[in-house]
Amino acid sequence: MNQIPLIRTLVFGGNRSGKSAHAEQLAAVTGREVIYLATAQAGDSEMQTRIEQHRARRPAVWRTVESPLALGAAITEWSAPQRVLLIDCLTVWLSNLLFSEIRDYPEIGAIEPPAAFAEQRAAFLHALASAKGEVILVSGEVGMGIVPQGALSRWFVDEAGRLNQDVAAICERAVFVAAGLPLLMKGAAC
């Protein structure tokens, strides 16, 4: 019996670059059961509309599991050799995690991350490295523009860049998407 190779793929790009659609296409062509780990939370009507648009284009047979914070636990629970986990989106998850505690953030000076940040981030990276089946991760590339003005924005951009680097190091394949066009950055062609 042939064993299905374990492939972890990072699909990243800017806003509205086509990264989610490309990741969904990669998941669909596997022919395996797809578990969609959704990180977005509907905090306002605009985000609710975005979530509904993503849901509408996914096949009805895909199972959606909402995982706004404990992404490592979700990967551990749902990964299996016969499945594909599609995680959309890491930068939304990072934002959820960084701002999970209600507090005032200074516009200047050092910013302390929430208590759960390091633990959840480490759990996620460990679960990704230990996944039992294919994993496709969608993430925003936020470091290609101008340097953000405020300390809070710079903190988020820095953490997103570090997260994308750590995820890309674990993944066997990385694909950058711009204008709907995928560019293979690491690994074998999709």
Image (cartoon, rainbow, N blue to C red):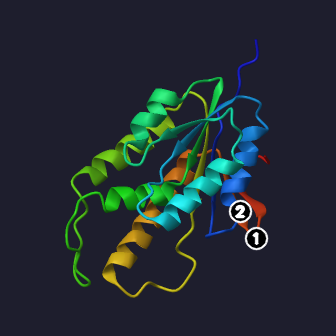
User: Picture coordinates of residue 21 (x, y %)?
Assistant: 71, 55
Pointer 2 residue: 18
- For disc 2, the neighbor class at 10 Å (few under 14, some 14 to 19, many from 20) is some
Upstream in the sequence, badge 1 or badge 2? 2
Q: Is residue 95 left or right of residue 131?
A: left
Residue 24 locus on image (x, y percent):
70, 47
Q: Is residue 160 above or below residue 75?
A: below
Q: Nearer the viewer, residue 19 or 184?
A: 19
Q: Mark yes or no: residue 180 visible.
A: yes
In this view, 103 is above or below 73: below
Q: How far separated are the C-alphas under marks 1 and 2?
A: 7 Å
Amino acid type at circle 1 is Ala
Q: Secondary structure at mark 1?
A: loop
Identified at 43% across, 84% down, the residue is 148
Asked which quadrant contains residue 175, the reply is bottom right
Q: Are marks 1 and 2 in contact (CB under 8 Å)?
A: yes
Residue toward you, 139 or 8: 139
Q: Which residue is mark 1?
A: 179
Question: Which amino acid is tagged 2?
Answer: Gly
- The crowding category of the residue bearing disc 1, from other C-alpha atoms within 10 Å (few below 14, some 14 to 19, many at least 20), is few
State the SS at label 2: loop
Which x, y percent locates residue 90? 50, 55
Residue 79 is left or right of residue 182, and the answer is left
Identity of the residue drawn at 45% across and 30% down:
76
- Is residue 31 positioned above or below 117 on the image? above
